[in-house]
Amino acid sequence: MKLIHLIADYGANDPAFAEVSQRLLSHLPAAQIRCLSVPPFSTLATGFWIAQLGLNPGPSDRLIYHNCAPRHDNPAARADNEGEGLTYAVLPNGVCVVGVWAGYTLSFIKDIAQSIHAVEVSRGGSQFRSRDVFPPAAAAIARGEKDLLGEAIAPERIPNLPSNRVVWVDGYGNLKTTIAADALQLSPMAKVTVRVGDVVSDAVFSDGSFDVPEGTLAFAPGSSGWSAGGKTVRWMELFLRGGNAWQRFGKPRLDREVSYQVQC
């Protein structure tokens, strides 16, 4: 029984998830589908969750099917609803990733994946390609069929991951960032000034979020990250113990820049 993570920007509880799930199950009837909604057009969040769900422990028989297609690759009018093309990647643990290559969707895994290929399937034909066009190809790949695989996509063709950005806001208001924990050279409990967008706040650097008193904003390695290729990555978070960091910083949207400076 295959686990399918369906990651898309349809919107929380959008019936589009039900429609796509139904279409996938028509090709893979024994699968179990778990849906994850990312904000509209947020290829950064999509790429983050591809890596977080794909590279961490889970069932070996796993497929990540993602669709976040802003159609920003060509600003001209689109004939036949054409958009960005479909891709296939296989991660070091054997997890398969199938979805549209747009923006940063492949940026987190581009140097980790064993291979990344284009998938030879129509780039048009429907406004709702993730339901009407792509599921048969995704299912074929999930079954181990490789007839639709096209050219290899070199990592250098894929955009680099943008550093110092808000990549996710969890249900507690913690801000997950694209700042790697091992990039910081700070002493525990060092006082720092953090800016997210246009809002500035004092914070304390911590190697564990709950090491700070209630009401204190912590800048600490968070719960997100993975191990792959002999390297372990953990991402920094902003955590307001007893409060909500997202609200503290004025409810920033994803992709907002994050900067920090050690206080003298």
Image (cartoon, helix red, strand yellow):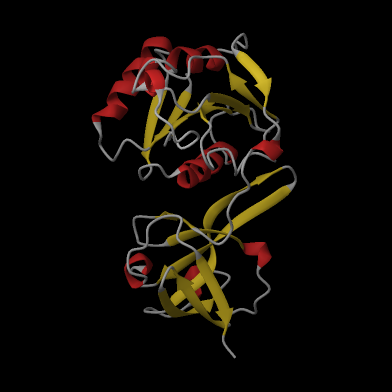
Residue farthest front in this picture: 76
Where is 202 relative to 126, above or below?
below
Q: Is residue 116 above or below residue 111?
A: above
In the rendering, at what x and y percent does residue 233 appear?
64, 53
Which residue: 37% across, 57% down?
253
Residue 80, quarter of picture: top left
Quadrant where the C terminus sits is bottom right
Q: Position of residue 36 (x, y in %)?
A: 38, 38
**Percent position (x, y) of residue 171?**
34, 55
**Depth order, front residue of 46/84:** 84
Residue 25 appears in the figure? yes
Q: Is residue 61 visible?
A: no
Task: Tell me the residue at 60%/43% (across/down).
Answer: 107
Residue 237 is situated, as x and y percent measured from the top left of the image, at: 50, 63
Q: Nearer the viewer, residue 68 or 17?
A: 68
131 or 102: nearer the viewer: 102
What residue occupies the far right of the structure in this picture?
Answer: 230
Nearer to me, 61 or 116: 116
Residue at 53% over, 32% down: 101
Q: Quadrant of residue 8?
A: top left
Task: Judge from the rendering whether residue 110 lies leftward or rightward of residue 8; answer left or right.
Answer: right
Position of residue 181 relative to residue 233, above or below, is: below
Q: Is residue 153 left or right of residue 261?
A: right
The residue shown at (67%, 29%) is 153
